[in-house]
Image (cartoon, grey):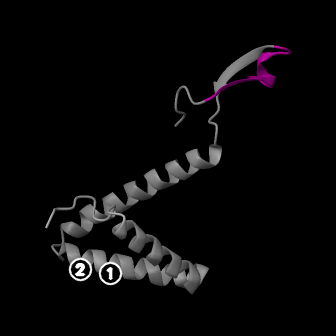
Amino acid sequence: MIYPGKCRKQHVDANAGFGILKTSNIPENLDDLIDQEKRALAREYFSDIWSDIQAENLGTELIVEVFIQEAIERLATEKGIEEASKLISHFKNMDEMGILPLQRTLQ
């Protein structure tokens, strides 16, 4: 998905004939756009799986615990324990900043 207004650049379209300019939208930071698209796809996969599992009535807490434990174990296996520890620290920091859970109640 290209976001309008981000950056407009012109380039020569090789198929359009010599010297004919074609305007296209090129994002300022392509890596950010790719990351956003990957995250959107991952959320879509997760939502599909979550819906299927919820239908089994296993309990939300159990599902979350198993998902997180499996994800951390697989990350540690594939990328190393340091990377898994960084992810855990990241979530601790998010919780301390009030980002997790998304809705907090005053006590």
Residues rendered magenta in the picture: 7-19
Q: Residue at x 36, y 64 (%)?
A: 97
Q: Residue at x 32, y 81 (%)?
A: 66
User: In this figure, which residue is indicated by the disc labeled 2?
Assistant: 62
Q: Secondary structure at mark 2?
A: helix
Q: Is residue 104 above or below residue 59?
A: above
Give the residue type that dot 2 points to.
Leu
Q: Position of residue 88 (x, y in %)?
A: 44, 77
User: In this figure, which residue is indicated by the disc labeled 1?
Assistant: 66
The span from disc 1 to disc 2 (Cα, nearest Å) is: 6 Å
Residue nearest the observer in this picture, 101 or 61: 101
Quarter of the image for residue 48 reads bottom left
Q: Secondary structure at mark 1?
A: helix
Q: Residue at x 52, y 32 (%)?
A: 3
Q: Position of residue 92 (x, y in %)?
A: 39, 74
Q: Residue at x 46, y 76 (%)?
A: 89
Q: Residue furthest right?
A: 18
Q: Is residue 80 shown in magenta?
A: no
Q: Is residue 9 shown in magenta?
A: yes
Are the residues at dot 1 and dot 2 in contact (C-beta closer than 8 Å)?
yes
Q: Position of residue 96 (x, y in %)?
A: 35, 69
Give the residue type that dot 1 points to.
Val
